[in-house]
Image (tube, rainbow, N blue to C red):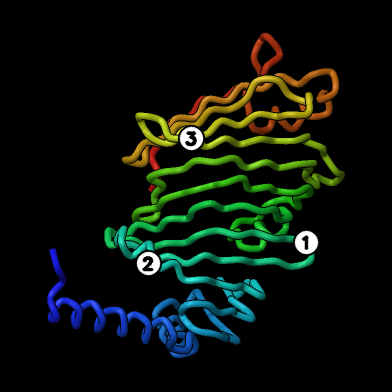
Amino acid sequence: MAISKRQYIIIGSVAYILALLMTLPASLFTSQINRLHPQLQVNGVEGSLWHGQVDQLLINQKPIKNIEWDFQPWALLLGRMQLQLTYADRDNHIQLEVAMSVTNTLHINHLDGQVSPAFIQSFTPYPVPALQGTVVFNDVSVSLMERRPQHAEGQIEWRGAAVELGRKVSIGNLLLVLEQDPNGIKAVLNEQSGLLEGGANLLLEGNGHYTLEARFIPTSKGRHLERHLALLLKKGRDGSYQRNLTGQLP
């Protein structure tokens, strides 16, 4: 069917408005973000909504520097406002897609890269021991609605995992696999370097109910972990360390 003159005018007007919005300086929105989200402080914004860079983003007073973004207009067809973000410094580099849908669902898609545990710890409000190693994200995607995970898939590796507990305690190489289960999100944790046999399985249902089953057996190379496992898990007669938990996310 031929497009009428009126339809041409409407399509052209919409395209013009979108182009105008995308070329607006991103700095126009900085004060609005800082006002609506006091936990976020955006400084040194350059570029437009289409493409730009933030010199420094403060999240709860913790700085992240040199973030770049690219707007992805095709996501509007899915009812999402979506950006591709890139971050890199001397020790860390990640890229991901962040989107907010009309259902107020936050989507974090195709997270790839590697960071130090210290980078992750800097945004954790809880006191935890110093961690060492490298955390690698491999095509991780997570969807959150009202702060509850609704979907998750991908792999997260913690290579050369170690914890400072008065002295360095090596945990080996940990692999966390996230996948969708008919009943919710399934997470499987295993140690890959031969220090521990067994693993942990977590099932998180859509209503926030979770079930955790963990069973680890130190090998001859992992005997140094027995004392630390005993602080978290219950030792069984077969020499394994186990813990089964169920609960409800707040």
Q: Nearer the viewer, residue 232 or 152?
A: 152
Residue 128 % position (x, y): 68, 52
Residue linked to disc 2: 81
Q: Amino acid at mark 1?
A: Asp
Q: Residue at x 79, y 66 (%)?
A: 90
Judging by the rendered image, the residue that carries numbered circle 1 is 91
Q: Nearer the viewer, mark 1 or mark 2?
A: 2
Secondary structure under badge 1? loop
Disc number at residue 179? 3
Disc 1 to disc 3, how far (Cα)?
28 Å
Q: Residue furthest front?
A: 2
User: Of residues 134 and 83, which is closer to you in this image?
Assistant: 83
Secondary element at tag 2: strand
Q: Earlier in the sequence, mark 1 or mark 2?
A: 2
Residue at horizontal 41 percent and vertical 43 percent from the top: 151
For residue 180, above or below residue 115: above
Disc 2 to disc 3, C-alpha distance: 25 Å
Amino acid identity at mark 2: Met
